[in-house]
Image: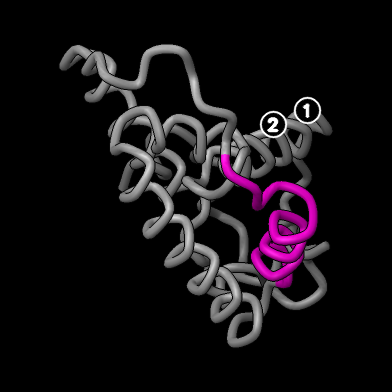
Amino acid sequence: GITSVLLPSVMGLSDTAAVSVHPLTVVGLTGLLVNALNFMPVGRIDGGRASTCVLGRPSATIIGSVILLLQALSGLAGDSPIQLFWGITILCFQRSQEIPCNDEVTELDDGRVALFGVLLVLTMLCLFPVPSEIFAAGTPDPFRL
């Protein structure tokens, strides 16, 4: 596959072998995770503000409530407590409605709506659950708190 072409030295390792990575890789992964959590369409965080702008206030409220419910279910039923922690943080500190802007009547152009869709897809890809089988025994799971 692609891994054998791009990283031929990794293909010779066993399934339980630890692969050392540069510390900036861990920093980059943490940055992706934090920014993806911040762009979830809930409350007054960046994703909530963007969804209110693109979808309107009533739709953004419904979507935000569904996302919070899914976060609670994911945090309680899954291996990673990050979703539960972030959902509780949003409920405690960021759940109030956004302050109305001066112009809520003018529609957004298609380019901005498409950009919102692309960013939402990237957010979902960053936050998809990662099966625990990927991480070998003894290897630290970067998605654990």
Question: Residue 61's mark?
Answer: none
Q: Are marks 2 and 1 in contact (CB under 8 Å)?
A: yes
Question: Residue 24's mark?
Answer: 1
Q: Residues within 10 Å of mark 2 (few under 14, many from 20)?
A: few
Nearer to me, 126 or 65: 65
Q: Pinpoint residue 97: horizontal percent, then vertical percent.
A: 58, 43
User: Magenta span has 90?
Assistant: yes
Mark 2 or mark 1, which is nearer to you? 2
* Residue type marked 2: Gly
Residue 101 appears left or right of 30:
left
Which residue is at 47% across, 46% downward?
Answer: 41
Q: In which quarter of the image is residue 85?
A: bottom right
**Magenta-highlighted stretch: main secondary structure?**
helix
Q: What element carries label 1?
A: helix
Q: Pinpoint residue 114: horizontal percent, then vertical percent.
A: 22, 24
Q: Pinpoint residue 118: horizontal percent, then vertical percent.
A: 31, 31
* Residue type marked 1: Leu
Residue 8 appears left or right of 121:
right
Which image quadrant: the C terminus?
bottom right
Residue tagged 2: 28
User: What is the magenta range?
Assistant: 81-97
Q: Pinpoint residue 119: horizontal percent, then vertical percent.
A: 39, 31
Instruction: Give the CA separation, mark 2 to mark 1.
Output: 6 Å
User: Magenta span has 105?
Assistant: no
In the depicted structure, whether residue 23 falls above or below residue 129:
above
How many numbered marks does the figure carry?
Answer: 2
